[in-house]
Amino acid sequence: MKNLFKLLDLTKEEIIDILDLADQLKYERKHNIYSNPLQGKNIGMIFEKASTRTRVSFEVGIGELGARPLFLSSSDLQIGRGEPLIDTARVLGRYLDAIMIRTFDQSTVEDLAKYSKVPVINGLTDFAHPCQVLADLMTIREFKVRFDDLTLCYIGDGNNMCNSLIVGALKVGMNVSIATPKEYEPHGDVLEFTKLYPGKFSLVHEPEKAVDSADIIVTDVWTSMGQESEKVKREMAFKDYCLTSNLLKLANPNYIVLHCLPAHRGEEITDEVFENNAEFIFEEAENRLHVQKAVMLKLLK
Ligand code: CP
Ligand code: NVA
């Protein structure tokens, strides 16, 4: 593995390897075992969008591996004043050992790697959120022990989270059922990918159908970063796509709910459903730290 652009690029074995290493790192952190395996490395973190979890979990994780994190906000970088990415990338590649970037276009992540020539990690684009979904898979395995025979259901916008969940869950062996409004379906490349898994994937427009007998139910915001001008239109389109206790009666009785956060209670999830599942949701947030440390070790060690 040279970069983490999107889960479509990873094999099942590579994903499982990352999860196994993340489990080990979680155990070691709980027992205060640190060995500075990336001592002397410098890892940049470029943010073109806001973040709480990604910023803090990467910064803490990089430090715990013995490397130095550099927080680089696009509003402070010359990128914000128009310096081309290909020049920025060629400069940063001379200072840094790896770069994490949160940006808009998927192509920006891949261009950054091409021109910087150092490993690049996608910390969220409009297309994908691979670090989050690796943390989600880690959390599912922690609470459910296995992947086979489980059904992951996603209700809401066919956005970056939905795209990455479909790919990650199918690759590790889960069944996937999705409910989105017609105009908000997942990306075409992802729908094309699902054809490799006949009988394991379904896309419908009725949340009740998708949630039927599901083991893991996931949702995400209706309006992602960068789509703020569509907020009102989206509230109308998604009004029937809220995770409520009533809807979840159709799921497998042992279901768990995950949410990448930040959550908008009263929109994609009720306060009751959120709080009943807080144990899983905040473990999921913690697992970002462990899984990203595993990714950085795979890329740099
Ligand atoms: N889930 C997630 O990526 O959170 P942040 O936007 O706070 O980084
Ligand atoms: N879909 C959301 C995820 C936030 C972590 C967004 O892109 O804003």
Image: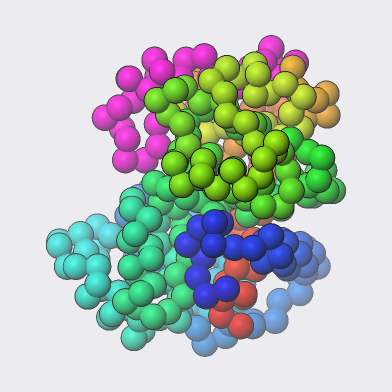
The residue located at (34%, 86%) in the rendering is 94
Whether residue 41 appears in magenta in the rendering, the answer is no
Vertical placement of 106 versus 257: above or below? below
Chain part drawn in magenta: 223-249
Relative to 48, say whether 187 is above or below: above
Q: Nearer the viewer, residue 223 or 75?
A: 223
Image mark count: 0
Q: Residue 74 in the image: x percent, y percent?
A: 28, 60
Q: Position of residue 285 (x, y in %)?
A: 62, 48
Residue 254 location (% of width, % of height): 83, 29
Residue at image position (20%, 59%) is 80
Please identify the quarter of the rendering in which residue 148 is found.
Answer: top right
Horizontally, residue 266 falls left or right of residue 64, namely left
Taking the view exactly as shown, the residue that stands out farthest to the left is 82
Q: Is residue 87 above or below residue 249?
A: below
Give the quadrant of residue 183.
top left
What's the residue at 57%, 73% (across, down)?
1
Q: Is residue 127 left or right of residue 59?
A: left
As rendered, which of 1 and 85 lies closer to the eye?
Answer: 1
Q: Nearer the viewer, residue 280 or 8?
A: 8
Q: In the displayed structure, does residue 184 sit left or right of residue 217?
A: left
Q: Is residue 39 visible?
A: yes
